[in-house]
Amino acid sequence: MKKKSSFSTQGQRADIGYLEISRMLPNRYADAVGPFVFLDHIVPRIQSKINKEGTGAHPHRGIATLSYILNGEDEHFDSAGNYAKVHSGGVQWMNAGNGIIHDETLNYDSQSDSQLVHAFQFWINLPSEIKAEKPAYLAIEGSEVPRKDLPDGKSWVKVIVGTFEDISSVIPNYSEQFLYHIHLEAGALFSIEFADEIEVAAYLPEVPAIINDEIFNVGEFIEFDRKQGSIELKNECQKACDFILFGGEAYPEPIFAEGPFVMNSKLDIAIAYRDFYNGEYGKIDYEKQKSKSQ
């Protein structure tokens, strides 16, 4: 049986500098899908000049941030001393744990001739015991992201988080969770089954498509019922279509979100702010970190 859509919605503008951003989650219908509590779509655009400002150094606590760079070059700094660049197709994952400061700068890919910039940022809520641990970090280049070709030989599934059939992401799973990038060529079809109580959402970044026999437009975020069933993705356009499919088991603890922090109580939020203002998250040493990579 095919899962039914619970709702669909468009995002709200949340631009940062030159980046045009559509905020998809949270939205007026949902605060979370499985452990995912935040989704920004940095919409595709041609970048004419190098951006040197980045997002600006800012704190996080209680979540893992995940930047998936479809097109571009993402530079990461944080107060735990981590530094890396990833390029088109790559992933920056940071477990903020008990507190960290980070900064990211997204530019066009210096390794290609394209000036196209296109990306996503997710926040993944952490279990309370992981929120209390030290931060962790992974930089994953596009060539290292697990990919499975589909039977037509042209369509494929990339596993950003979780497992699909016989391939798995290196990103840690603190609960049952998944994040797939599914690419379907014209006329292609893909179907996947989900167990009871699993929360699932889909997003169409660039091309309209048919999902479980309903037509959805570009920029639509769709969440589905929580009954066991399948999701069928169908591309009836004359060009390739990409789908973002993500979710997992429901987060079992209370959720309190304020600014860059996602915790389990109002007191936890207050402590997160107190520790930040007391300087306990450290500082970013930009020059030192960048010099280590050269």
Image (tube, rainbow, N blue to C red):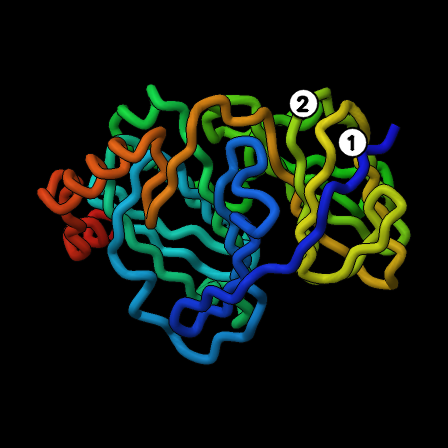
Q: Which secondary structure, mark 1?
A: strand
Q: Residues within 10 Å of mark 1 (few under 14, many from 20)?
A: few
Residue 3 coordinates in the image, percent (x, y): 80, 33
Compare residues 198 and 192 and report the one nearer the observer: 198
Assess disc 2: are there few (<14), some (14-19) or many (≥20) residues with their C-alpha within 10 Å of its C-alpha.
some
Rendered position, 225 above or below 44 = above
How far is mark 2 from mark 1, CA to CA?
Answer: 15 Å
- Where is residue 273, by image quadrant? top left
Q: Position of residue 208 (x, y in %)?
A: 78, 59
Q: Which quadrant holds the N terminus?
A: top right
Q: Place residue 238 in its image quadrant.
A: bottom right
Give the percent coordinates (x, y) of residue 147. Answer: 65, 37
Q: How many marks?
A: 2
Tag 2 secondary structure: loop
Q: Is residue 138 visible?
A: no
Is residue 101 shown left or right of residue 22?
Answer: left
Outermost residue, bottom side: 48
* Closest to the observer, 131 or 268: 268
Q: Is residue 239 above or below residue 144?
A: below
Q: Residue furthest left?
A: 278
Q: Amino acid at mark 2?
A: Glu
| Residue 81, horizontal then vertical, whole percent | 21, 42
- Given residues 236 and 4, the one toward you in this image is 4
Residue in the image at 81% along x and 44% along y: 233
Q: Amino acid at mark 1?
A: Ile
Q: Which residue is mark 1?
A: 192
151 to the left or right of 9: right
Q: Which mark is residue 207?
A: none
Task: Tell me, for residue 197, which label it has, or none.
Answer: 2
